[in-house]
Image (spheres, rainbow, N blue to C red):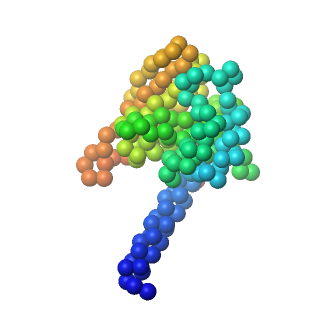
């Protein structure tokens, strides 16, 4: 076999091994306030059925324009983004209870957050948002927008507990948009995005 083919095969194997290591690093179990456990792992197209079921459970009634809630038709595209840009939360028994995805536009990103009703006030939204903020930072985003209903206290608490500076706007009187300012990289290698206060103080990883 020519040397160039061997080098090419070795390079592909190296990239595949690195991808597996990144995936393993991102799989972790969190213990939420109250003791509930959830497995966080990267979301892929293989999770389309699970995410679609979660999407149906979380759909606002009546539907609200510009609410940050994705159309069902957009799910394959959001799940098909490059690895690591979305995270799925599973309860014991591999039951999906939450999903977060990053829709990036230049140096800004929009957060998509879904959580089953029984898990919204358990701290899961804060953990998902912290994971998404890290992904946004690693993807080169300087800001991360989170859109929620005016009365959505669970999202407001998740944003506040993240511990990052943010601005608040109400574009149409029905929704609130939180714009998080992510830290800018410094020196070679940059700096790590701050861990959410909720993730550090009230949720532990195993």
Q: Quadrant of residue 163?
A: top left
Q: Position of residue 99 (x, y in %)?
A: 61, 41
Percent x, y of residue 9:
45, 75
Of all residues, the one furthest to the right in this rendering is 93
Q: Which of these two is toward me, 138 or 107?
A: 107
Q: Farthest residue toward the left?
A: 187
Q: Residue at x 47, y 72 (%)?
A: 13
Instruction: Name above or below for residue 162 compared with residue 153.
Output: below
Residue farthest bottom in this picture:
1
Q: Is residue 112 left or right of residue 5?
A: right
Q: Is residue 10 above or below residue 192?
A: below
What's the residue at 51%, 43% (across, down)?
131
Q: Residue at x 54, y 24 (%)?
A: 66
Residue at 27% across, 45% down: 186
Q: Give the image location of residue 127, x and y in percent.
A: 55, 40
- Compared to 151, does 38 lie above or below? below
Horizontal side of 38 relative to 167 (left or right) equals right
């Amino acid at each position: 076999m020519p040397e160039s083919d061997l080098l090419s095969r070795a390079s592909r194997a190296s990239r595949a091994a690195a991808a597996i290591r990144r995936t393993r690093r991102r799989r972790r179990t969190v213990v939420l306030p109250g003791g509930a456990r959830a497995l966080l792992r990267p979301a892929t197209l293989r999770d389309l059925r699970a995410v679609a079921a979660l999407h149906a459970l979380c759909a606002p009634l009546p539907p609200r324009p510009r609410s940050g809630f994705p159309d069902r038709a957009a799910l394959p595209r959001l799940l098909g983004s490059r690895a690591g840009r979305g995270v799925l939360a599973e309860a014991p028994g591999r039951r999906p209870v939450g999903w977060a995805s990053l829709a990036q536009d230049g140096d800004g990103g929009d957060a998509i957050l879904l959580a089953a009703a029984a898990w919204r006030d358990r701290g899961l939204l804060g953990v998902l948002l912290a994971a998404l903020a890290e992904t946004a930072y690693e993807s080169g985003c300087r800001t991360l927008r989170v859109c929620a209903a005016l009365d959505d206290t669970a999202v407001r608490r998740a944003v506040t507990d993240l511990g990052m500076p943010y601005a608040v706007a109400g574009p149409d009187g029905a929704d609130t948009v939180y714009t998080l300012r992510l830290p800018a990289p410094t020196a070679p290698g940059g700096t790590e995005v701050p861990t959410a206060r909720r993730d550090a103080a009230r949720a532990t990883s195993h």
